[in-house]
Image (tube, rainbow, N blue to C red):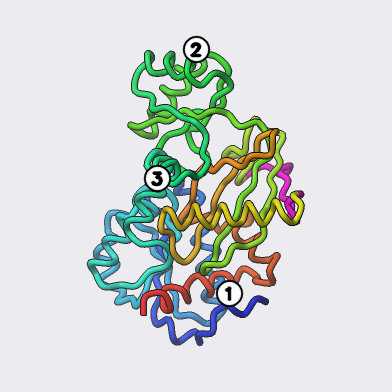
Amino acid sequence: MNVSLGSTHAPADFGRVAVLYGGKSAERPVSLKSGQAVLDALLGAGVDAIGIDVGDDFLQRLGAERIDRAFIVLHGRGGEDGSMQGLLECAGIPYTGSGILASALAMDKLRTKQVWQSLGLPTPRHAVLASEEDCRDAARELGFPLIVKPAHEGSSIGMAKVADVNALISAWQAAGTYDSQVLVEQWIDGPEFTIAVLRDQVLPVIGLGTPHAFYDYDAKYLASDTQYRIPCGLDEAREAELKALAARACEAVGTRGWARVDVMQDRAGQFWLLEVNTVPGMTDHSLVPMAARAVGLDFQQLALAILADSVDARR
């Protein structure tokens, strides 16, 4: 195990820990699985942990349970967008992961892209869709194929690959049922990679493969034919380049504790940043636990390392 990544704290050092999961976002089913896995790991390690499915009674539960810190495993809006982080800040409760600003920024795909572009970091060309005319304009400017995305969703929810204007309009309308702001991006034809960052260290790159049109919700959480490659298939120099790019992407957003960056590589070898996740999945299909295993951290050690950062980084 990489000692610098692991926790050196005794279970009692964490006090009473609330694992916050579930919530009301479109990613609730994934969060329930992630949260239960984290809760089981912490309890197995001897941590005084409880699970709270975040609902309408959350404030009452938070006051009644008298917790010392929170492990946030809420995916999507309401947990990954700065709102939960702000509430916990006001309550004086330490928590895992990124702070208010980085959480809010990373959840907004458009603002994240604008920050990356301002710093000269590569991210696919894009447009914002608010009307059928926007769809036609984007088609003329960007060409096909394109990928349509709700600006504030994760887990590939509401995303669609399109190859003509009619499909683009339909995909924009469908994505609009999840989010009032919809993006369309230039399609990058090539392999996809994901890079986890844990306690300021970049973990081994994972190469992804799927027979689906792209790495969609089914490929992420349900399919048995998704391919995960560690080593990722890049030579040593290119992998180092990609890891450095992921670190710069996280630094630009201001992430803390842990995060995961998704990247495409085009046929010419150029890397393109897609998004950064500040509360990545922790299910049996999830990518951060896979990357952690590659450096000798099992799931329980990973959960403790993430929790330890809520102590160490906020002293």
In the rendering, at what x and y percent does residue 184 appear? 46, 28
Label drawn at residue 5? 1
Residue found at x 40% / y 37%: 151
- Residue situated in front as seen by the camera: 174 or 309: 309
In the rendering, at what x and y percent does residue 57 appear? 27, 59
Secondary structure at badge 2 equals helix
1 vs 2, front mark: 1
Q: Main secondary structure of the magenta part?
A: loop
Secondary structure at badge 3 equals helix
> Do the residues bearing badges 2 and 3 touch, measured as CB atoms within 8 Å?
no
Residue, disc 3: 115
Residue, disc 2: 166
Mark 1 → mark 3, Cα distance in angstroms: 28 Å
Secondary structure at badge 1 equals loop
First-in-chain label (1 vs 2): 1
Residue found at x 70% / y 65%: 294
- Looking at the rendering, the stretch of residues picked out in magenta corresponds to 222-233
Mark 2 → mark 3, Cα distance in angstroms: 31 Å
**Left or right: residue 36 compared with residue 190:** left
